[in-house]
């Protein structure tokens, strides 16, 4: 942890890397945990000391730690109805959520409105579907870019603007929903009133979080943990376009999504799963297709570490660890260290563990993955097979107590990535992490 400034946790793969568990583990040592991207489409699971699991979407993971301030930054996209539901869910689990004490919402965050969700549903019902979570994120981001979006500041200033935007937006989609074969919605006016009722419950949380964060950083030497949603390969600038999300997922997104200067970034922890996963469409160079192995790798889909999307509930595509993609992610993010998850799952591979160390594309070797989905589709993985192990390592607390083959695996990754691996997840619980 930095003495002051911002430490960041970002995903180096395609989301679902297990970022939430490291944020949850570290958050108690920070003054502020801040979300800078994503929305209700991004899920993260935290496990409390009593073993209770919590599925969060818009609220930062620091909310479970007493005394930690949580900030939803301007770079996120906010769904008031779902956020109110999430706050109620947390309170039902005996977690306090108090306006401007442990939860702040940026006045500059753009709102996901009901017609954004409807438009998402219409697109996903047609030939132009993108594998969206249908949370309205892409249409909301599109209106933001088109300067037609509605920001959270209007909740305390002009709910009439929100009402008008929703009603007009939904009425314009009546015929589009019919053509897409979707059920008609309730009366637009009723939907708008329900939405505003939820939004008004958030009014006391809304403030200028850019000023708040910079004031804390510059005058009070605050320690801030920036929590990223999703992962590098879903970034709209650097990911596998068009199979990407709508808000920046890289370290650069912190500057935009929180409104802070680069001089505050001290430490960037990149998180990767050693069993790589992906939800939705898009190229997956190291994807596993053997059903017998997939059944082993998916594990118990109802468990906290089961390979099912937190938000979508969809079974994840799985693959071997891909070092060329991690090298590009490290390069763009300025990763200073790496945390890995699911080392305990590697014994499921058996006697050998394949790791992709290079690509070949059109006869040319690539040690760093190319920069587009089109090129990724043309790549062939080149594997090194490492020795496996059969021991259960979930109770191991020291690196030197891991099986020799597991130690060799970690050191192999460090050599090929030229980064220290400082945290190693050996199980899903908060304390099942080896720190180095």
Image (cartoon, rainbow, N blue to C red):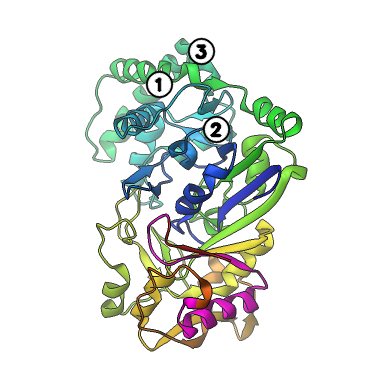
Assign the C terminus to one quadrant of the image: bottom right
Which residue is denoted by mark 3 in the rendering? 156
Label 3 element class: helix
Which residue is denoted by mark 2 in the rendering? 71
Residue in the picture at 53% in, 27% down: 105
The magenta stretch is 401-430
Left or right of 216 on screen, residue 140: left
- Of circles 1 and 2, which is in front? 2
Between 17 and 181, the one lying in front of the other is 17
Q: Crowding at label 2, few (<14), some or many (≥20) Cα neighbours within 10 Å?
A: many
Whole-percent x, y for residue 164 in the image: 43, 15
Q: Which mark is residue 229?
A: none
Between 169 and 237, the one lying in front of the other is 237
Residue in the picture at 31% in, 80% down: 290
Above or below, comparing residue 9 to residue 148 in the picture? below
Which residue is denoted by mark 1 in the rendering? 166
Between 208 and 64, the one lying in front of the other is 64
49 part of magenta stretch: no
- Please tell me in which quadrant of the rendered image residue 371 appears: bottom right
Disc on the earlier residue, 1 or 2: 2
Label 1 element class: helix
- Of circles 3 and 1, which is in front? 3
């Amino acid at each position: 942890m930095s003495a002051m400034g911002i430490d960041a946790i970002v995903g180096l793969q395609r989301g679902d890397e297990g970022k939430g568990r490291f944020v949850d583990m570290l958050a108690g040592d920070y003054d502020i945990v801040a979300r800078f991207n994503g929305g209700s489409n991004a899920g993260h699971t935290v496990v409390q000391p009593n073993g209770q699991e919590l599925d969060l979407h818009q609220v930062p993971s620091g909310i479970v730690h007493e005394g930690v301030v949580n900030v939803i930054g301007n770079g996120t996209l906010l769904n008031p109805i779902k956020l109110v539901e999430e706050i109620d869910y947390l309170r039902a689990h005996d977690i306090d959520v108090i306006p401007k004490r442990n939860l702040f919402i940026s006045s500059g965050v753009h709102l996901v409105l009901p017609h954004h969700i409807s438009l998402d549903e219409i697109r996903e019902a047609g030939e132009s579907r993108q594998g969206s979570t249908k949370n309205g994120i892409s249409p909301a981001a599109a209106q933001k870019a088109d300067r037609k979006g509605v920001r959270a500041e209007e909740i305390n200033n002009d709910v009439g603007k929100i009402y008008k935007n929703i009603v007009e937006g939904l009425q314009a989609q009546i015929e589009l929903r019919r053509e897409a074969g979707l059920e008609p919605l309730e009366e637009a006016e009723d939907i708008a009133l329900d939405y505003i009722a939820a939004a008004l419950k958030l009014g006391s949380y809304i403030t200028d979080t850019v000023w708040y964060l910079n004031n804390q950083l510059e005058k009070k030497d605050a320690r801030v943990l920036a929590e990223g949603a999703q992962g590098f390969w879903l970034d709209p600038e650097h990911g596998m376009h068009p199979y990407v999300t709508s808000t920046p997922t890289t370290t650069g997104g912190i500057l935009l999504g929180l409104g802070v200067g680069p001089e505050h970034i001290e430490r960037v922890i990149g998180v990767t799963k050693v069993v790589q996963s992906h939800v939705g469409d898009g190229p997956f160079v190291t994807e596993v297709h053997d059903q017998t192995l997939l059944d082993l790798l998916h594990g118990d889909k109802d468990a906290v570490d089961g390979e099912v999307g937190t938000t979508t509930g969809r079974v994840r595509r799985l693959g071997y660890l891909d070092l060329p993609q991690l090298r590009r992610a490290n390069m763009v993010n300025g990763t200073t260290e790496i945390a890995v998850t699911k080392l305990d799952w590697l014994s499921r591979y058996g006697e050998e563990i394949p790791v992709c160390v290079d690509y070949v594309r059109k006869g040319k070797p690539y040690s760093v993955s190319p920069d587009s989905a089109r090129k990724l589709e043309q790549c062939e993985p080149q594997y090194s097979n490492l020795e496996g192990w059969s021991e259960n390592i979930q109770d191991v607390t020291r690196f030197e107590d891991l099986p020799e083959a597991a130690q060799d695996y970690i050191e192999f990754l460090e050599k090929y990535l030229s980064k220290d691996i400082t945290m190693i997840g050996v199980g899903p619980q908060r304390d099942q992490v080896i720190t180095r």
